Image: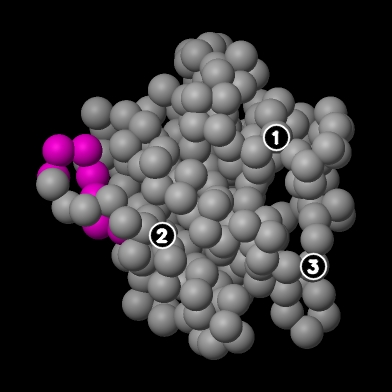
């Protein structure tokens, strides 16, 4: 497993514009759409999760992602995004993502960032990686947390409880400031298209 940390996108950044295929889930029960764009998101806090189907770090946190979806429900919009290259990792294609979502009973949108534009706009580096946005006074989704779910990693025996992300979620949903002392996520590096790696991509740690 290649250990890669988050780049830690600067806080206050605005959610990049996007329109991506939605391979699973929906914004609301009963809504069926082939794509989802940033303009369709409700005006509420938004959690963007860069994940995929095959990564062992993602598999490790899947149960807590399900619990977060259940616990924060209607007050929070969750978006899962897979940006891995399908030329090198076809298991992260639509069928693999749909199978993962079905196994975990995820109903939130799962988007396929096949051109890797959203991952690059977020300066994504690893899976899993988490970005929490909340609407500012102008209605723009602004970044208030990025980094790890918690300190749990495969095999380190630290409890998987989402404590870091949950603290940020609780602050946002209660109208409080988010602690800016934030720890990077660590996981497998995003599998960039060969020859199209972003400037921040280097040799795995």
Q: Is residue 154 magenta?
A: yes
Residue at the location (49% across, 37% down)?
51
Mark-to-mark CA distance, 1 and 3: 19 Å
Q: Secondary structure at mark 1?
A: loop
Mark-to-mark CA distance, 3 and 2: 23 Å
Mark-to-mark CA distance, 1 and 2: 24 Å
Query: Could you say which is closer to the camera, residue 24 or residue 197?
Result: 24
Would you say 73 lies left or right of 100 here?
right
Looking at the picture, how far across and down is residue 180, in whole percent? Answer: 42, 79
Looking at the picture, how far across and down is residue 156, in whole percent? Answer: 13, 45
User: Which quadrant holds the N terminus?
Assistant: top left
The span shown in magenta is: 150-156
Would you say 52 lies left or right of 134 here?
left
Q: Which residue is mark 2?
A: 147
Closer to us: mark 1 or mark 3? 1
Q: In the image, which disc is placed on residue 25?
A: 1
Q: Which residue is mark 3?
A: 43
Q: Is residue 145 magenta?
A: no
Query: Could you say which is closer to the camera, residue 39 or residue 69?
Result: 69
Residue at the location (85% across, 38% down)?
31
Q: Secondary structure at mark 3?
A: loop
Residue 138: image quadrant is bottom right
Discs 3, 2 touching: Cβ within 8 Å = no
């Amino acid at each position: 497993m290649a250990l890669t940390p988050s780049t830690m996108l600067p806080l206050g950044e605005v959610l990049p514009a996007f329109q991506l295929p939605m391979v699973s889930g929906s914004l609301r029960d009963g809504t069926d759409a082939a794509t989802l764009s940033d303009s369709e998101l409700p005006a509420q806090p938004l959690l963007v999760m860069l994940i995929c189907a095959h990564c062992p770090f993602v598999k490790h946190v899947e149960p807590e992602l399900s619990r977060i979806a259940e616990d924060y429900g209607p007050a929070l919009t969750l978006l899962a995004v897979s940006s891995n290259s399908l030329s090198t990792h076809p298991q992260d294609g639509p069928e693999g993502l749909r199978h993962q979502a079905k196994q975990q009973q995820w109903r939130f949108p799962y988007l396929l960032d096949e051109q890797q534009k959203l991952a690059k706009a977020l300066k994504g580096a690893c899976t899993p990686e988490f970005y929490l946005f909340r609407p500012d006074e102008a209605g723009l989704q602004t970044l208030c947390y990025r980094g790890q779910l918690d300190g749990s990693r495969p095999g380190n025996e630290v409890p998987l409880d989402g404590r870091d992300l949950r603290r940020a979620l609780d602050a946002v949903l209660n109208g409080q400031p988010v602690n800016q002392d934030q720890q990077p996520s660590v996981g497998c590096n995003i599998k960039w298209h060969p020859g199209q790696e972003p400037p921040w991509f280097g040799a795995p740690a």
